[in-house]
Image: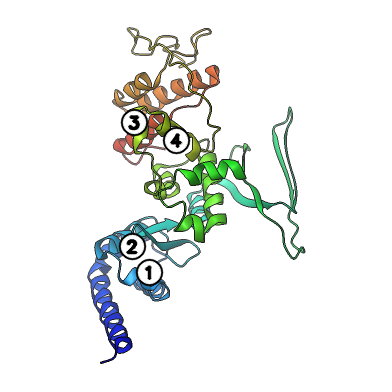
Amino acid sequence: MSAQSHQVSTAAEQHIALGKELEVLKPELAKVLPAHVSAEKFMRVVTTAIAQSPDLRSSDRRALLTACVKCATDGLVPDGREAALVMFSGKAQYMPMVAGILKKVRNSGELLSIVANVVYEHDQFRYFVDDVGEHVLHEPNVIAPDRGKLIAVYSIAKTKDGGVYVEVMSRSQIEQVRNVSKSKNNGPWVGWYDEMARKTVIRRLSKRLPMSTDLEAVVRRDDELYDLNQQRLGTGSGRDAAKAMLGLPILPDADDAAAADANSSGAPEGVDPQTGEVIEGNAEAFDEPKAIESLLAAKTLEQLNAAWIQIQAFHEKAVRDIPLAVEGTYDETKPKFGKKAK
């Protein structure tokens, strides 16, 4: 048998074996998929995705099947539009795409609309802020043979109560995020740069939007692509990576503010225990350990949200960024209180 014939035979065997494993997985997929997506349809899309990317056939089988389950759990299909199965460090990885994220947002009913677009150097673009709010004017130069290099991305969301939220990120801010990626020189950041840029600005905007925990989970599905493990150790590099993930400027570290003792009501010092509002002159009562401690001490969802509001108020008053370690603690703690966590 020739080498070429042997390769074809091996590929065919892998395809048959994978088909059998997917068939075994079918009942589990049916449990987590939304009603409008059948397990049969999902499996057909997966089979097509694997056929179009031979590397997936030879990837770690457990990682591939896990990626499929995660994708199904999020109610998306890996068709290259809603989501994709990509290779990362030799293993298959499920990656939600912008279209899939926007679909989840629309179906959730929590927002009226949300868009994310790329700005190229030959487009007409203006971003400004006045007493009314933030404004974006973008005229894509769609008739140009070459729109030029990507120079920015932006996202705009409208809430049910009429609020409008805007995030704009420059190319340099996008590069900050890419630089903390474990696969900055390969994988999604090479093959899907525009897509990753749009997801980055959506991620940053999502911090300010009303989202359920399951929707937040979709937005953050590819967190493991980034090297943020040092953030909880309080190292400078970890904080810089955290800020980059949020599209925030990396500035020299400020001296940590002194932690405040909790008063008898259970509210941190400098916070009105009835309203949760910051008392004038106490804007820096929370340092990172104190903020994390207050979140972990919450016994109910209401206590958790009250602590989070206080932390946000302190940092806003101090004009300082909330450390991602604190935000991560909040995100990880919310699901523990069940489906009511919004």
Q: Name the residue under label 2.
A: 68
Task: Look at the image and tell me in which quarter the C terminus lies.
Answer: top left
Task: Look at the image and tell me in which quarter the N terminus lies.
Answer: bottom left
Q: Name the residue under label 1.
A: 42
Residue 283 versus residue 23 in the image, above or below: above
Q: Along the polypeptide, which appears first: circle 2 or circle 3? A: 2
Q: Along the polypeptide, which appears first: circle 1 or circle 4? A: 1
Residue 273 versus residue 147 in the image, above or below: above
Q: What element carries label 4?
A: helix
Q: Along the polypeptide, which appears first: circle 1 or circle 3? A: 1
Residue 35 picture quarter? bottom left
Residue 31 versus residue 276 in the image, above or below: below
- Name the disc covering residue 242, or none: 4
For badge 4, the amino acid type reads: Ala
For badge 3, the amino acid type reads: Arg
Q: Mark 3 points at which residue?
A: 232
Distance between mark 1 and mark 2 Cα atoms:
9 Å
Say which of marks 1 and 4 sits in front.
4
- Between 51 and 149, the one nearer to me in the picture: 149
Distance between mark 4 and mark 2 Cα atoms:
28 Å
Q: Is mark 3 on a helix, strand or loop?
A: helix
**Colour convention:** rainbow
Distance between mark 1 and mark 4 Cα atoms:
34 Å
